[in-house]
Amino acid sequence: MANSLFKIVVIHDGLTSNDDPLLVELRLNFGEDSVERFENSNQGLQYVLDHLAQKMVVLLDINFSHGELSGVQVFEDIKKRTALVQVIMITARLLSEIGHEDLIRMINHDAFAIENVFSSQKIVGLVSAALHKMEVRVDSALEQWISSHSDEEQNQPYLTTRNGKVYTLKQILEEIRQQTPYGRDMEKKILLLAIDLLTRGKKKIDD
């Protein structure tokens, strides 16, 4: 299942080797080049923020060494920038041992999962579910449609806003991925257009 279109970003200070069973299992299931590992939470966060235009699932430890951002802080910083990155929180602690306020913050900011059983197979299953959730999003459908066009078409001016700003297809996709105000507005308009088309009475959808 090798795929350079998405990244699985593992931010965990307990995974100190690329030969760790979880990392091996992730690479076997999703492709050698799809997995990025960071032991330092600050560096992991920076990588995610530098690649917001790419589809990502983040496996994030909750606790890190003194002087580093906590997993909850990294999680919140990601969610402040985009709602589209799927974050799976993982910890060796029991959920009852996690602070109540931290749990509320993770749930309120839409953590994909909070997992305290460190099972490679279960984590792989959660990543697969997160990737599936991404595949049915507007940006993923738009990416698939854009990829059917030539590079020249993808980089040509495609849409001009009322204030005169011009966007190519690739730029529209990036705006949606990064959840900018324009990206969120465009995402909403695409969904409304899809609903309008579906409610016009067409019973068959062409491939």
Image (cartoon, rainbow, N blue to C red):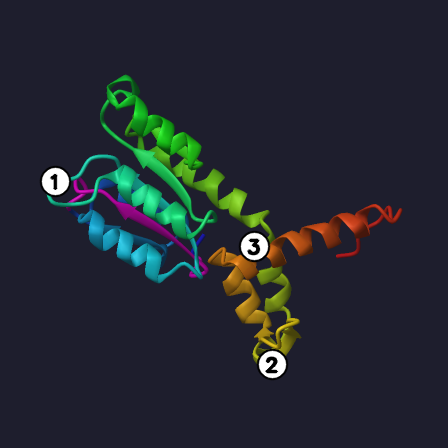
Q: Quadrant of residue 31?
A: bottom left
Where residue 32 appears, as percent x and y from the top left, is 33, 56
Q: Quadrant of residue 95?
A: top left
Where residue 15 appears, as percent x and y from the top left, is 19, 42
Q: CA distance from mark 1 to mark 3?
A: 36 Å
Q: Residue furthest right?
A: 201
Visible in this render: residue 34?
A: yes
Q: CA distance from mark 2 to mark 1?
A: 47 Å
Q: Which residues are magenta?
A: 3-16
The disc label shown at residue 156, or none:
2
Label 1: element kind:
loop
Near mark 1 (Cα within 10 A), the count class, few <14, some 14-19 or many ≥20, is: few
Q: Residue furthest left?
A: 66
Is 204 one of the magenta-colored residues?
Answer: no
Q: Earlier in the sequence, mark 2 or mark 1?
A: 1
Mark 1 sits on what residue? 65
Where residue 204 appears, as percent x and y from the top left, is 84, 49
Is 4 one of the magenta-colored residues?
Answer: yes
Residue beneath the point at 30% across and 22% down: 100
Near mark 2 (Cα within 10 A), the count class, few <14, some 14-19 or many ≥20, is: few
